[in-house]
Image (cartoon, rainbow, N blue to C red):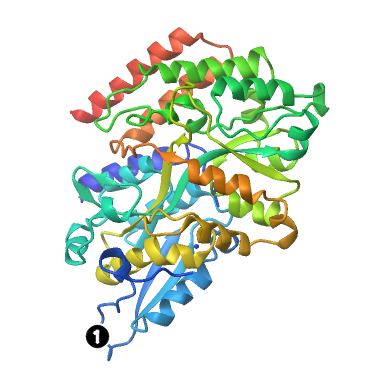
Amino acid sequence: MKKSLLVLSGILAISTALAGCGKSETPAATDKGAGTATAAASTAPNKAPVTIKVQAWYTEAQGNWNATVEAYNKTHPNVKVVYEGMSEKGDSQEGMKKLDLLAASGEQMDVVMYSSASDFAQRVGAGILEPLDEYLKKDNIVVKDEYKIDPVVNGKYYGLPGKMIEWFVLLNKDKLDEAKLPVPTDWTWNDYAEYAKKLTKGEGATKTYGSYFHSWKEYALLALSNDMDNPYLVKSDGTQNIDNPKVRYSLDLRNKLENVDKTSVPYFEVVSQKMAYRDVFYGGKTAMLATGNWMVGELALNAKFKTVFAPYPKYDAKDTNGLTEVGADFMGVAANSKNKQAAYDFVKWYTTEGIQTQGLFFSGWKKADIGKNVDAILKSGKPDQVAMIDKDSLLATLKMNKATKLVVPPTYALQQEKEYLTQVELFLTGKQDLEKTITTAKTKLEDIRKSNAK
């Protein structure tokens, strides 16, 4: 316990270091394995319902949680599931910080969720999550057969993938038409740069850019997301992956677009003005936005103009089309839960049938139907906004997407991400050159690995 609390204190110290994602599906037929998620909870029928909490950062508007847990409660009379939002703003980092505080104070926790593999891995290291291997074995569930990604940590399972995140590019159709550019269906990052040039217009305060990259680590690893086996800044053992040529290419591309061609919003403006990527796109400040598929649900509620979709650009023209980084919300059972079986039953249901019932996100379950998934998300939106979403290019892009391997990093990966982003900032603001950025980042990441290996 002492070690867990020490690790947890480290989480609390850095949990605000990275920007929160704030990223805010008709039940499938049941069968063996994860499809048996509607089995009754373990509590005996003659007892009062067991209450379990589901805690995450989503607001009700972002997550439709009340209707989701109500659907579960109706078919599980011996359990009462209650959703408890951890952030009024729907900010994942704020929400996870509150979850850390709950864990440290011993408050009731049952079902918890984390928004990235690195956040998830760090909480595993802090002892916050219960191993699920015995529960999965009892239900004959082989995770890599049931789910699109395999969130194994040191040979054990501490969570299952909920909302699955794949990336693509949103494009403002009006601006594309004005520039007489077709909707891309197979393109490289070099093609993206050319589009950015042709889509940039004006000067000064009224200037509109062809491209926008946010402050998250994903935008400092653009082409690395096309790497099938190692799409992250470190490998699963914590050794640095900065030597990968796709890292150097990605940083050089960012610098070219932002500081040379001036066709992408400069990094300094992004951070100094605390830009919100949604607002930049909705406001017409950029014509293109590389982002995750959670934006489909948000567009269905907030679209301002006709939006089309293109696959994530490729590093090389010879590469497989549609390769994209994969992410997920990782849902698990709190180690201090007094009702672990009931909590696990909900996790199993939500990550299979439940997320489709929720109707807002894309499922990581292999049995989920992508067409029905899209229809459910669009059905939850506003008719006028849904009409602005080009369904043909959306479906074509989603069917084209091919997820790279999920890297569940070491428990100290957030420290490495923070240090890497520090070096990237120095480069993009002209305070050090690319060579020093690469060299220093490699050294810093290795130092962090070695210090945690002691």
Residue 305 is at least partly visible in this image = yes
Residue at the (67%, 24%) spot, across then down: 196
**Quarter occupied by the C terminus:** top left
Front-most of residues 404 and 270: 404
Q: Position of residue 123 (x, y in %)?
A: 32, 47
Residue 297 vs residue 218, the one in the foreground? 297
Q: Is residue 170 above or below residue 268?
A: below
Q: Mark 1 falls on what kind of element? A: loop
Give the quadrant of residue 415.
top left
Query: Which residue occupies 47% across, 64% down?
Result: 356
Quadrant of the rendered structure where residue 381 is? Answer: bottom right
Q: For this rendering, which residue is in front, 357 or 67? A: 357
Point 52% across, 72% down: residue: 67
Residue 211, x across and y down, in percent: 66, 28
The residue where tag 1 is placed is: 44
Q: Is residue 291 left or right of residue 261?
A: left
Q: Residue at x 38, y 71 (%)?
A: 29
Residue 88: x and y in percent read 57, 57
Disc 1 crowd, CA 10 A, few/some/many (<14, 14-19, 20+) = few
Res. 109 visible in picture:
no
Q: Is residue 218 left or right of residue 239?
A: right
**x%, y% of residue 324?**
45, 36
Amino acid type, callout 1: Ala
